[in-house]
Amino acid sequence: AISRLNLFSTKNMPLSWLTVCKLVPATSFFLKKKDETFAYGYRGSLLSRLAVAALHMSNNELARKAIDVRRLEHRASMMPMESAAIIRGLLRVGNTTDALTLLNDELSLPLQGTPLDSHENKEKLKHRALSLASIASRHFFEGEPCMAVKSCDMLSAIGPMIRESGLTIDELAMPWTRIIKGATQCESGRRSGSVIPCMPEVELPCNLVYAVLKAMTTFPSDNNDRTYEALSI
């Protein structure tokens, strides 16, 4: 049954509840019983699915096992798309520390001297950017501006590389509008006193939206009306 699962259905790796219920028990068996022929050729992808499914079910122990086995035994076949999906799953359960660790390990910056326009580097840059966007957006909406601003600064740092790689606006599909809305909401909370920065070492701009705009200017131009409408709210 597992061999017939579509492991690469979309870039966001959506999981129906039925798929989760089938996948977790079956793959848990795979983790406990080593069978070299089982899922041969796409074991790493199956483990990434298991990690995401386990996080959906708040089974953090199983997710941790799947992430560790995938990293230790299947590093050569890890795909940036899968790493980004695991990061989003970790963020959903509030595990920012592990999400950042995975980001800097599996979606690290391209090696110096390698062509940024290679398929491998473009995929890593794309999913690193989207993962940082998820971190920024989630933390703005959760009233945690320091981590959100740090993520925006990291986006600003890779913006020039994104441009040099030749990635287009359509390929990136950066959620700038959502990030700006989150920054606007968080800024309102900061001014009212309901949002209190928890990392004093992080220097925040006078308006949190400025951190997002700074990152946006380093990326390929996105003249989206909805984004500019969000700025006027």
Image (tube, rainbow, N blue to C red):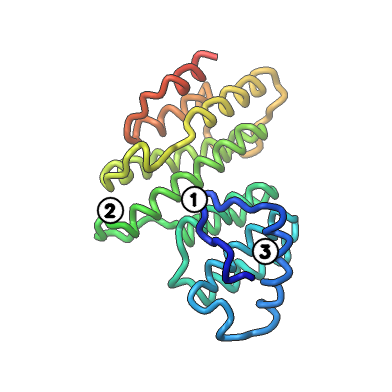
At x 33% / y 56%, what residue is drawn? 121
Check disc 3 and report its element: helix, strand or loop. Answer: helix
In the rendered structure, which amino acid carries the disc numbered 2? Leu
Q: Residue at x 35, y 40 (%)?
A: 159
The image quadrant where one finds the C terminus is top right
N-terminal-most mark, 2 or 1: 1
- In three-dimensional space, the C-alpha distance between marks 2 and 1, rounded to whole angstroms, equals 21 Å
* Secondary structure at numbered mark 2: loop
Q: Which residue is mark 2?
A: 116
Q: Which residue is mark 3?
A: 63
Which-is-in-front pick, marks 3 and 1? 1
- CB atoms at circles 3 and 2 under 8 Å apart? no
Q: Mark 2 or mark 3, which is nearer the start of the sequence? A: 3
- Outermost residue, top direction? 232
The quadrant holding residue 141 is top right
What amino acid does circle 1 point to? Lys
- Residue carrying label 1: 11
Locate residue 225 relative to residue 168 in the image: left or right. Answer: right
Residue type at the position of mark 3: Ala
Q: Badge 3, how many Cα within 10 Å: few under 14, some, many 20+?
A: many
Apparent side of residue 53 relative to residue 219 in the rendered image (left or right): right
The image shows residue 114 at horizontal and vertical percentages of 26, 60
